[in-house]
Amino acid sequence: MKLVIAATGASGTIYLQRLLEQIDVVANEVHLVLSGHARQVATQETDELRIPFGITKHPENDLNVPYVSGSTRFDAMVIVPCSMSTLGRIASGSGETALLRAADVFLKERRKLIVVPRETPWNLIHARNVVTLLEAGAVVLPAIPSFYSRPQSVVEVADTVVWRILDQLGLPNPRAYRWKDERASATSLPD
């Protein structure tokens, strides 16, 4: 699979870090682009963003990258975390940076675009922009963790969101917790 992974200036670098660590870069071609604000937030939230060997890094404003053209085949793009400012720019069709142009290309080519907003609360403008992206075909996957797996650390909490992203990409995810109703297997139904 050919993937573009991007990050913008919202808090939530841990989601990006964990996603990069769980994608098999031998089996998948991964291109990474960070906005300037994403780099600033990453520095504040982590000691250092660890980019696994084999991931191709691109500058935010290089419009010569392959994924900004509809004629180049890519399978999916994930923006994690995605600021509401970036989400709004994508909803308006802005293509002023390579990251925004790529999101626009993925929508127009009907390729999978997954945006992972982390900001809260939303105002009405945010909600309308989310609806616009949903109507355009994007997957909006807010960074809302689950607790079925009884996570014991911040990393395990973050992984509950990353598992959902991997599921949306169709990538193997053997560590993901899968809900099952224990009561259904313990109790038989009457005939």
Image: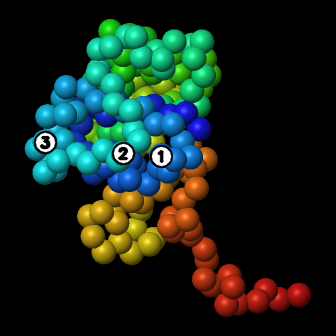
At which x and y percent is residue 149?
44, 72
Amino acid type, callout 2? Phe
Marks 2/3: CA–CA distance: 20 Å
Q: Mark 3 points at which residue?
A: 43
Mark 1: amino acid: Val
What residue is shown at x 60% (from left), y 22% (from top)? 73
Calculate the distance from the C-alpha at mark 1 to the C-alpha at mark 2.
8 Å
> Which one is earlier in the sequence, the residue at label 1 or at label 2?
1
Residue 120 seen from this side: no
**Helix, strand or loop at disc 3?**
helix
- Closer to the camera, 183 or 89? 89
Report if the CB atoms under discs 2 and 3 are less than 8 Å apart: no
Residue 141 appears anywhere in the view:
yes
Near mark 3 (Cα within 10 A), the count class, few <14, some 14-19 or many ≥20, is: few
Q: From the image, which quarter does the C terminus lie in? A: bottom right
CA–CA distance in space, label 3 to label 1: 24 Å
Q: Residues within 10 Å of mark 1 (few under 14, many from 20)?
A: some
Quadrant of the snapshot with the N terminus: top right
Cβ atoms under marks 3 and 1 closer than 8 Å:
no
Q: Position of residue 139 (x, y in %)?
A: 52, 35
**To which residue does mark 1 refer?**
25
